[in-house]
Amino acid sequence: MSADRSEHSFEGAKGPAAVARSSDIRGSYDERLNHILVAATDLIARMGYERASMREVAKAAGVSLAGLYHYFDSKENILFLIQFRTFGSLLNLSREKLHGVTDPAEQLRVMVRAHVSYFAANMAALKACSHELDSLTGQSYEEARQLRREYYELTRAIVNRLFETHAPNNKLDAHVATMSLFGMLNWLYRWYDPQEGGSPTSIANQIASQFLYGLLGESKGGD
Amino acid sequence: MSADRSEHSFEGAKGPAAVARSSDIRGSYDERLNHILVAATDLIARMGYERASMREVAKAAGVSLAGLYHYFDSKENILFLIQFRTFGSLLNLSREKLHGVTDPAEQLRVMVRAHVSYFAANMAALKACSHELDSLTGQSYEEARQLRREYYELTRAIVNRLFETHAPNNKLDAHVATMSLFGMLNWLYRWYDPQEGGSPTSIANQIASQFLYGLLGESKGGD
DNA sequence: CCTTACCGAACGCACGTTCGATCGAAGAAA
DNA sequence: TTTCTTCGATCGAACGTGCGTTCGGTAAGG
């Protein structure tokens, strides 16, 4: 039996300098699987899915090439697990943080903060999700797509409420607005480095402020 | 001698149904090169750079596999030409349209409109540019990167002027604002279909309005 | 003695690239 | 005008490599 799809946040709490070395391959089956998954995520984020070969994943994880297939059915299954768990974690995190928040504008800020801080803590995983959306096929693609859709619905609902509550008669399209917000968030991996580009919170605050009030609106931005 | 980097807008005026068939391989050297480049651009946009094999490019362009190497030094050279010409065209187009426009807010609108309409007219090329930024290496990568940087400077200067002229004391970071704008624009290829998602002008107007005034600001958006 | 965990070696395939040859047109020589 | 020569354009076939995957085996532990 190979990997199913449980066990969230496999990149949980890991110091920035704690690069996976081929020593800590001890532990339970799930721990070893996660260890490989972390190495694969890092490789896919750095080189892209197609260029990240199974041989290099094996080397980075400290197992043999054939040994990988004890944990994963195929290369595509690795990418699927990365995307499934990452989207799942992100969705759960957002829903948790949104619990009890009623003002749509505040909901928007909370959602953006959750996304940016999750990104800062899991850059490789989120890059592998943003950039390799179309590298899955068939059933795997559909399941990942479904999770993305749920995340879209969550955000779209906030945007809808924003329109109804705070700007009932503007002419903006909610779908375009939502996708623009996703554009800002999903493009983060191209330029944002939490090490030297400001705290996740300040970035999130600015993105949320821009989205709500624009560059020329009432400036509540920055930090 | 293989291809240099002249000849802009190689996807110039082509009806939507005019899929490149293996008939019109007549014409000058440059015309045949462009014909191949169009086929390659379409394939790379649809399947990604790594998956778009030289054999499939050859088939789509109506030439033999070996025949490709009469026009291009390597597969990477094809991608470089696509990116170099596309970024070059986009940069030229933006500079032309901005000529004579003095108000920074209007400059922003003009720039966004130019980008979105160029996108609508050259979706495959712009997707190959947005999505395959890191597929080039060495000198090719540096040259493409330089063009992107020029486009960034152009946009960043508009944002700077916007801050100085219209919002001198807000707390937003100009770099974050510029990259957010690029996020909105470069994410277009994931969701915007000009065939059924509204005119490029209306999309551009909404993106510009959102960027300037936000969702809750003075609504000048829509069309 | 069976199962789990793992590996070395190989298989078959698809890839980017190269090589040698062909064919037609343009230009020089007769 | 005819013949000879060159050269750009093109192709079929192959080369070498790296890929994802599989197979048969081994060693340890219950």
Image: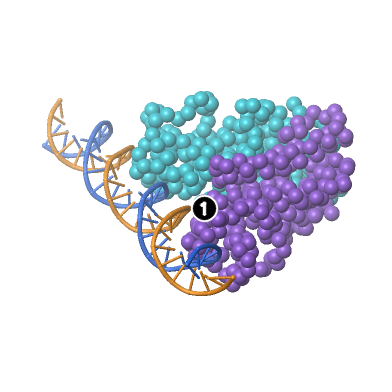
Chain colours: A purple, B cyan, C blue, D orange
Q: How crowded is mark 1: few (under 14 residues within 10 Å), some or many (20 or more)?
A: some
Percent x, y of residue A110: 82, 48
> Seen in the image, is B70 located left or right of residue B151?
left
Q: Nearer the viewer, residue A171 or B142?
A: A171
Q: In which quarter of the image is residue A150?
A: top right
Percent x, y of residue D5: 18, 42
Residue positioned 51% across, 25% down in the render: B17
Q: Which of A114 and C9 is in front in this view?
A: C9
Residue positioned 76% across, 51% down in the render: A93
Q: What element carries label 1?
A: loop
Q: Can see residue B138?
A: no
Q: Name the residue under label 1.
A: A74
Image quadrant where one finds the C terminus of chain A: bottom right
> Seen in the image, is B219 located left or right of residue B30?
right
Q: Which chain carries label 1?
A: A
Residue positioned 88% across, 34% down in the render: A165
User: How many numbered tags mark residues here?
Assistant: 1
Q: Can see residue A114?
A: yes
Percent x, y of residue A37: 60, 59
Please name the amino acid that badge 1 sits on.
Ser
Q: Nearer the viewer, residue B22 or B90?
A: B22
